Amino acid sequence: MASKVYIVYYSMYGHVEKLAHEIKKGAESVEGVEVKLWQVPETLPDEILAKMGAPSKSDVPVITPNELTEADGIIFGFPTRFGMMAAQFKAFFDSTGGLWRTQALAGKPAGLFFSTGSQGGGQETTALTAITQLTHHGMMFVPIGYTFGAGMFEMEQIKGGSPYGAGTFAGDGSRQPSEIELGQAFHQGKCFAGITKKLKGAA
């Protein structure tokens, strides 16, 4: 039976969504793994989003908490707000109390990816503060470490991401994920899918 990897994200301006699609490609490159993209619910009204210049949401389906239990491994992605996950994603985690009560997600591997507005905007703190959510659910955090190789030591160009997971810098919103950032996202998907498959096979 195939291993199921869910990529669950929130993206206001599309940066996180681009990383999510690349992570999906990487995960799908592992034989015997099924991958599905999900968005978490938006909490802001349309008129506010319009004033913020946010584009319309894509047709990626919106997940409910109980659907998380179907996955063998989950990668969560979100933009940062003051060094932490965006409120929309925190609201989603807050809605998983029923799963926490039964520890329905305990033992499942989990990864993280993110987008920040600047180099000091939270490429590490966003992941660090998100790990508390995984811990209370009993999930196993799977970082990428330095497995991306030379790409982790890139100094000639601006690059998001960290040992915690793939990442990008959005700047004022006009900057899009670079080739090396997309490469790291693909790498994370491939590594995470391999680990998820290995854990399921050992169960």
Image (cartoon, rainbow, N blue to C red):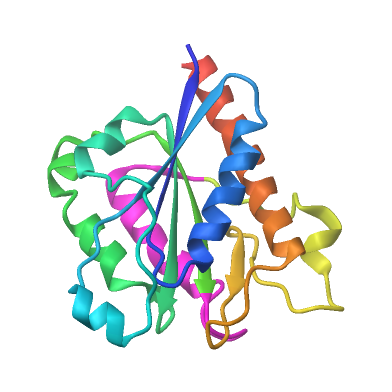
163 to 87, vertically: above or below:
above
- Residue at 36 percent across and 50 percent down: it is 59
Asked if residue 10 lies left or right of residue 44, the reply is right
* Magenta-span inclusion, residue 118: yes
- Residue at 64 percent across and 65 percent down: it is 162
Rendered location of residue 70, percent (x, y): 32, 28
Asked if residue 119 lies left or right of residue 134, the reply is right
Rendered location of residue 193, percent (x, y): 58, 34
Residue sitting at the far top: 1
- Residue at 29 percent across and 45 percent down: it is 137
86 to 94, vertically: above or below:
below
Asked if residue 108 lies left or right of residue 66, the reply is right
Q: How many labels does the image show?
A: 0
Rendered location of residue 101, percent (x, y): 14, 41
131 to 168, vertically: above or below:
above
57 to 29, vertically: above or below:
below
- Residue at 59 percent across and 47 percent down: it is 23
Q: Is residue 105 visible?
A: no
Magenta-colored span: 116-141
Task: Examine the image and state in which quarter residue 41 appears.
Answer: bottom left
* Magenta-span inclusion, residue 39: no
Rendered location of residue 48, percent (x, y): 23, 82
Nearer-the-camera pick, 88 or 99 = 88
Q: Can residue 39 be seen in this view?
A: yes
Task: Examine the image and state in which quarter residue 11 appears.
Answer: bottom left
Nearer-the-camera pick, 60 or 191 = 60
